[in-house]
Amino acid sequence: MDEELRQRIQDRFYRNQERSLRSASLLQLVDAAMEERIPITWQLLHDFSSLLTSGHDATIQVQVLELFRSVTGQLGGRALLDPFARAPALIAGVVEGTPRSAGTAIVPSRDVYEAISRLTDPPIQWVHSDPISGLEQLAEQEFDLIVSSPPPGYMHAVELRGGEPAYLREELGDLVLYRSTRLLSATGVMLAVVADGFLSGKRRLLWESWSDERLYLRAVVSLGSGAYSGMSIPMSLVVFEREQRGSVFLGRLDPGIAVTDLARNLEAHSEGDRPELGVLVDRNQFVGWEGFVRQRALDALRELGAQPLEECGTVRSLTLKAGESYEPPHNVIFIPTLGTGRVLTSPPEPKERGTYRTIEVTLDPNLVYAPYLAEWLSGPQGRRSRELYVRGATIPHVSAKDMSHLLVLVPTLDAQNRVLEVARHLANVEATVTELRGELWRNPAGTASITARLERSTTADPDEAWADSLPFPLASILYQSIADASPRAKVERLVHFVEAFAEFASGILVSAIYRTPQVFAALRTDVAKAFGPGRTPFDRGDFGAWVNLGRTLAKGIRRVADDADLNRAWQPTKKVAPDVFAAFVDKGFWEALDQVRLIRNRRSHGGIDNPRQIQAQYHELQEALVWLRQQTVAIFDDVYLIQPGACRIRNGVYHYDQARRLMGYAPAFYEIALTTVMPLDDDGIALVGRSDPMGRVLPLVRLFRLAPAPATARNACYFYNKRVGSDIFCMCRTTSRMSQNSLSERMTSHSSSLT
């Protein structure tokens, strides 16, 4: 309908009813059109249907109408019947496109019946009746061509006749089609648009039984989920005829398909030059278009050497409950049961007070590494493979049994190693590109340095680049993991690195709240609850304690934004290192750290000695570090970690002429001149803004100290480990040496005051 014609009808209707078109009935629109002296055609009624709120689900799409007209035009027929005409377009379009034919249509709706009775062409007898009664009225007639599109999902209470199968008790559309076949001539053909569920299960028994009446399935054309406007149910056009053939024609009506070519191939019962234009499948193995596509995809995967998932490990269903910890086995992946979301290598976290159903696959480390398979299953080819096993149109889901048969591509372990290394490098390049794009527009004058960094990112080891950006206490451990040749040593060092990261981040958050008394007072209760009565986070500084402390503080600081007074007090501290605080307060940061803790625990409890298992755990650790690396590689670009050294005081300003800049993994530290308005301990450690160091200074709680490592005489960092009575023990995580020393008497006061 062109816009001018629509506007005329709309204006007339508004003058008559003072309402919008969408609140109209079909008959009211027809009356408005007649008052405007507009000829009433079936095309106009079809356009009207698309405008109506109440009738939009019966509006067949134009391309589907064209297919009906093309197919019926090829097949021919004199007497045509639509036993369930919800709208006139289907039967009218077919009659108009079939020479020397006349039609009969049973119209259940009074409004539609009165509207289409205004049609004078094409020649159709309109019968106002429910479909079952209408078919009884036409029982003495015979039709060459039956075309229908009964509404899917309509239930009925019609009493079945003797001999009619019991499975006709449910869908009204099935019963209408079944009884319509009794009116089909000896050479007749029936076309119907049906939901894809018609092609399988017990509904398949319906049309298979028609062979007793010499009526056989000839063709199925998938229409997808867009056959009717407002409906998302996958549907198909099915064609039945009196001639029995050994094969079924199968096609697909896609937007780019030439409808006439598809119809021509269907009529000739021949294959097209692409599957969508027609393929012939064995009648006994017919499973519909989706089944055909699925089988082709499975065959293609098998040709590539894919194997069932059950051959790679143990597949089982798993229900996780909120609040209950779960220690998964080694080398494991978790496949979601709903949809085809991302596959994980750590257990998904159920929502509060809820449960989460997943599929756990414990993989054989001699065959496949969990990070490789998780990434493959989350990628395009893996998702397509999983889609082949999805059940349910409304809620797509998979079961453990389905997934045990899932075909997966598993190259050699050496090939998996190479794939994972390249994937990690690409992920880091992507993160660098994102970072540099933002920096380019923040500092357009810095194109030379941005270009140089971009070029380095494509060739440099991403872990080296990361280490170079971190403060020395962390960078020294990460660099040692790069230097280690043994996979076992690399795994141990990476775990040490992440544990140190948890302690370092917790220390910065503790230091920040000490600087802000209002926030400190607000969060003390949270920390006390997290560790229980009589305990402090510093009783034993293990991995779990640092993650617990950091998570608790991060959650509390996130809440600060909701309190105007606390937020105002927090801003000066936040200004010292905004990117650092944004990263350490992020929930995902602590989840990434905790994932490494769980990997560490599995190794500790399981006693991994197999080199393949160690390599699998190395890949698990690297995967967990990808997010951590991407989120933290640039957060220290605007701050230094420094050790102030000796101080001169002049006019209330503190001058540190040889402050050591503790950044990167180089054993020798650059010395810089630093001026602050805040006194700093000469052997303490602080975060200082690279710009405006006078106003951006945060002294850090003494959870670590710098000292020469005895074995190498190089600089080393000792992290707080535990307290036994009045003795404090620290560990150098690059050498795994323990040291008994006094970090500071303030360690004890911090411990007690925090809880």
Image (cartoon, rainbow, N blue to C red):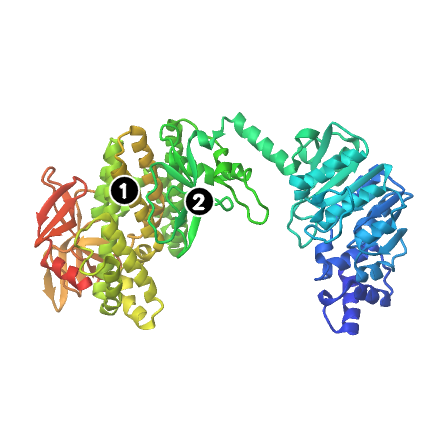
Please state which amino acid type lies under the numbered disc 2: Thr
Work out whether residue 538 can be spotted. yes
Q: Is residue 574 left or right of residue 229?
A: left
Of all residues, the one furthest to the right in this rendering is 100
Q: Which residue is mark 2?
A: 358
Rendering coords of residue 13 (x, y %): 78, 69
Check disc 1 and give the amino acid type.
Answer: Asn
Q: Nearer the viewer, residue 638 or 305?
A: 305
**Kind of element beneath mark 1:** helix
Residue drawn at point x = 90 percent, y = 46 percent: 140
The answer to whether residue 530 is above or below residue 375 is below
Q: Secondary structure at mark 2?
A: strand
Rendered view: 337 above or below 512? above
Residue at label 1?
A: 601
Question: Are the residues at dot 2 and dot 1 in contact (C-beta closer than 8 Å)?
Answer: no
Q: Is residue 282 visible?
A: no
Mark 2 or mark 1, which has the lower sequence index?
2
Q: CA distance from mark 2 to mark 1?
A: 22 Å
x, y percent for residue 399: 50, 41
Q: Tell me if residue 695 comes above or below residue 170 in the rendering.
A: below
Q: Quadrant of residue 312?
A: top left
Q: Position of residue 533 (x, y in %)?
A: 20, 61
491 and 132: which is toward the camera: 132
